[in-house]
Amino acid sequence: MAKKILIALGGNALLRAKEEGTFDQQVFHVRHTCRFIHKLIEEGYHVGITHGNGPQVGAILLKNEIAKDKLPPMPLDACGAESQGLIGYMIQRELHRITQGEFTPVTILTQTLVNAKDIAFKNPTKPIGLFYSEKEADKLKKMKRWHMVHQAGKGYRRVVPSPQPIDIVEGATIKKLFQQKQIIVACGGGGIPVIKKKNGTLEGVEAVIDKDLTGACLARIIGADIYVILTDVEQVAINFHQPNQQNLDKLSLKKAQKYLDEGQFAKGSMGPKVKAMMNFIEKGGKKGIITSLEKCLDAIKGKTGTHFKAK
């Protein structure tokens, strides 16, 4: 039986820093990424895909801002939905092209359930969108009730909550498709954050969910044998970029927590990935790997990468 793998694509698999972010640039990177996904399929692995969406949502928010006097801006959850469709389309098209029509993923517009009472809603910390002057920031705080923070030398920027994912609304459908050997693309950008109201209906909220944490939830739902988080380094390291840097082949939950407590993993980069992998293992996941796109197949075969197991 083919091993089931969920791949969480990092931002560098879709767009590189300092690029304009044109459609052609993004397609170029998606095409490169899909070649590695195709290698996994050729090796007999059954692959599911999730991905980040930061640059894409940022661009959509900027377009909203520029066109606000002509068209009504969309809320953040709707912008997340737009980005899921855009990125899913690129992945579907390019994998279909590379495999000459043998494989076409199915993209599922995915809603992620969060708790309306999550403490994150009282303490927004995730910066999004443009930088504003103090005057503009004060106006937005009054008009839209946005939370704004000051970043030295740049100005004021909106921050939104980053609540914990509870469940995936379309989880049962995604699982059924995956069991039918479909290649699924789901939970893009951590999923569209929604809360459940007292009458049972769902309502979108303006928040950002960590995509690797939602990926851990998705991996458990579809029964993935391996959850792989791709980033721009081959292995997790302690003392990163220092003369005594040490790359880690394996990380137990105990060691991972120790290094997190020591501040070894940066909050804005490796820290959330390690936490997401710990969450996956703690809640019954079989095996997790953090590695780079280029080394993904070697890591799955045990030749490289940082491997997480329960014991």
Image: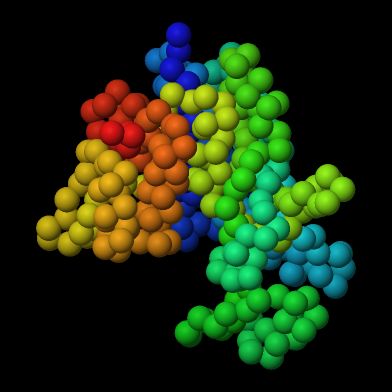
Closer to the camera, 9 or 206? Answer: 206
Closer to the camera, 112 or 230? Answer: 112
Examine the rendered structure and indicate whether residue 156 appears above or below residue 220. below
Residue at the image position 65 percent from the left and 66 percent from the top: 121
Question: Across the whole image, how many numbered discs are drawn on residues?
Answer: 0
For this view, does 39 lie left or right of residue 204? left
Residue at the image position 30 percent from the left and 61 percent from the top: 261
Furthest toward the bottom, the residue is 135
Furthest toward the left, the residue is 244
The x, y position of residue 127, in whole percent, is 57, 68
Residue at the image position 60 percent from the left and 57 percent from the top: 163
Examine the rendered structure and indicate whether residue 150 appears above or below residue 128. below
Examine the rendered structure and indicate whether residue 288 appears above or below residue 127. above
Examine the rendered structure and indicate whether residue 282 appears above or below residue 121. above
Q: Quadrant of the C terminus?
A: top left
Q: How is the image coloured?
A: rainbow
The x, y position of residue 308, in whole percent, is 32, 37
Displayed quadrant of residue 97: top right
For this view, does 213 lie left or right of residue 132? left
Residue 179 in sight from this viewpoint: yes
Q: Quadrant of the N terminus?
A: top left
Residue 83 in sight from this viewpoint: no
The x, y position of residue 130, in whole percent, is 62, 72
Displayed quadrant of residue 244: bottom left
The x, y position of residue 237, in whole percent, is 24, 51
Residue at the image position 75 percent from the left and 69 percent from the top: 66
Furthest toward the top, the residue is 1
For this view, does 20 lie left or right of residue 132? left
